[in-house]
Image (cartoon, helix red, strand yellow):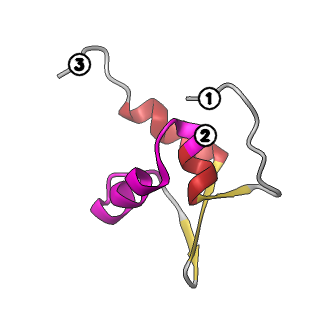
């Protein structure tokens, strides 16, 4: 996870911004979303948005003590 504030305006981040915030590519984030494995998101039409709170929670819940 990146230790900086997101540059997106408002409380929501687009896929590219959210992926960068978590250290992933936008393509990988879209794949996680399609597989139901990514963080919670909001969708208005075709626009997908994430909150920083949901991203932080997802990162914490997917961390592991040991690699498997």
Give the structural element (helix, strand or loop) at label 2: helix
Which portion, as a residue range, is magenta? 20-39
- Point out residue 32 in the picture as x, y percentages from the top left corner: 35, 54
Q: Is residue 62 left or right of residue 9?
A: left
Q: Are marks 2 and 1 in contact (CB under 8 Å)?
A: yes
* Mark positioned earlier in the residue sequence (1 or 3): 1
Q: Which residue is mark 2?
A: 21
Q: Is residue 60 left or right of residue 35?
A: right
Q: Which residue is mark 1?
A: 2
- On screen, residue 1 above or below 58: above
- Residue at the farthest top position: 66
Give the structural element (helix, strand or loop) at label 3: loop
Q: Residues within 10 Å of mark 3 (few under 14, many from 20)?
A: few
Q: Are marks 1 and 3 in contact (CB under 8 Å)?
A: no
Q: How many marks?
A: 3
Predominant SS along the magenta part? helix
Q: Which residue is mark 3?
A: 67
Q: Is residue 68 left or right of residue 2?
A: left
Q: Residues within 10 Å of mark 2 (few under 14, many from 20)?
A: many
**Residue drawn where x is 47% and y is 41% of the image:** 24
- Point out residue 25 in the picture as x, y percentages from the top left corner: 47, 47
* Mark positioned earlier in the residue sequence (3 or 2): 2
């Amino acid at each position: 996870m990146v230790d900086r504030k997101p540059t997106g305006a408002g409380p929501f981040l687009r896929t590219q911004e959210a992926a960068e915030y978590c250290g992933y590519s936008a393509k990988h984030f879209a794949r996680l979303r399609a597989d139901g494995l990514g963080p919670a998101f909001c969708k208005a039409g075709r626009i997908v948005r994430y909150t920083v709170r949901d991203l932080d929670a997802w990162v914490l819940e997917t961390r592991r003590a040991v690699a498997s």
